[in-house]
Image (tube, grey):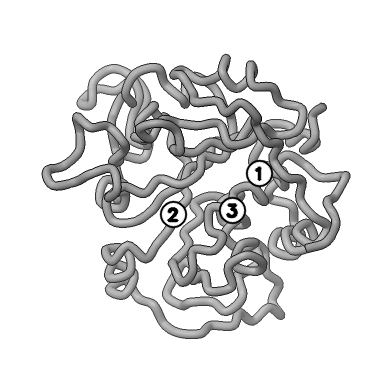
Amino acid sequence: MSTPATDYTLAELMIVAASQSFANEGEVLATGIGVIPRIAASLAMKTTNPDLMMTDSEAYLLHEPNPLSRDSEYVQRNETWMGFSRIFDNVWSGKRHAMIGPTQIDRFGQANISCIGGTYEQPKVQMLGMRGLPGNSISHGNSFFVPSHNSRVFVAGECDVVNSIGYNPERLPKGYSFDDIEIGLIITDLCVLDFGGANKAVRLVSLHPGITVEQVVENTGFPLEIPADVAITAAPTEQQLEIIRAIDPRDFRSKQLKDNPKGDRS
């Protein structure tokens, strides 16, 4: 890798941090839901995990990840066909890693993409619905992307609707243990978190440059495990920025965060 960049945005910092979710995982199908997770998976495929599988979102596996915008001259390099039956075989065998953007996450890693407030029958805010998240979460690994780290996302109690399995002993299906659950990183605009704390507690892995532990704690609705020495999230390298710009030539990434500030907010 080339030397660390000095001029980069928060979106680019988060893309590089999110790409670590897919690093060194070998031949798994990457599903990055949303612009930043999608670019992150593509970056991992181009750098840390060349064995990563990626589809064109239709039916083909790609040798090279598609750029987010393509002109009429672009021809994607398809390696093989992967229709729905093969997708499901892949998902159910555990050979997939998705990065999703939940509306709520609780201290157990349970996620909500369905609805908020009120009752399930009459919620205050209706969202996507459960979609495939319950089955996906027990079949393969998932990581989370949170563009705005606050206590409305990282809720004090359980999620209003629990859509996915987490490290909650009271909700474990019969025959399951924590070893059967795979939740990777949580990438936010403030920090990187994981579930490496005691008894799978949410742990602070790194702070983005210029962010303090106090800011993270104030914006999280539950206690975090905080190491004595907290790392600083690594800046993108010039090579990583070059790849990101080739994947996203029209800079859709900058539209995903409010004002998209500089990556170093010291």
Amino acid type, label 2: Ala
Looking at marks 1 and 3 on the same chain, the residue that comes earlier in the sequence is marked by: 1
Q: Quadrant of the N terminus?
A: bottom right
Where does residue 6 sit, x and y in percent of width and height?
88, 45
- Find numbered disc 1 in the image and state the secondary structure of the residue it sits on: helix
Residue found farthest to the right: 6
User: Number of labelled discs?
Assistant: 3
In the drawing, does residue 81 fall left or right of residue 173? right
Where 172 falls versus 66 (above or below)?
above
Q: Which residue is mark 2?
A: 98
The residue located at (68%, 31%) in the rendering is 258
Q: Quadrant of the C terminus?
A: top right
How far is disc 2 from disc 3 in space, using C-alphas? 13 Å
Q: Which quarter of the picture shows residue 2?
A: bottom right
- Find numbered disc 2 in the image and state the secondary structure of the residue it sits on: strand
Q: Which mark is residue 84?
A: none
In the drawing, does residue 114 fall left or right of residue 142? left
Where does residue 55 sit, x and y in percent of width and height?
48, 70
Q: Which residue is mark 1?
A: 14
How far is disc 1 from disc 3 in space, using C-alphas? 10 Å
Q: Which quarter of the picture shows residue 244?
A: bottom right
Looking at marks 2 and 1 on the same chain, the residue that comes earlier in the sequence is marked by: 1
How far is disc 2 from disc 1 in space, using C-alphas? 16 Å
The reply to whether residue 60 is visible in this rendering is: yes
Q: Residues within 10 Å of mark 1 (few under 14, many from 20)?
A: many
The reply to whether residue 112 is visible in this rendering is: no
The residue located at (27%, 32%) in the rendering is 168
Q: Which mark is residue 20?
A: 3
The residue located at (69%, 22%) in the rendering is 212
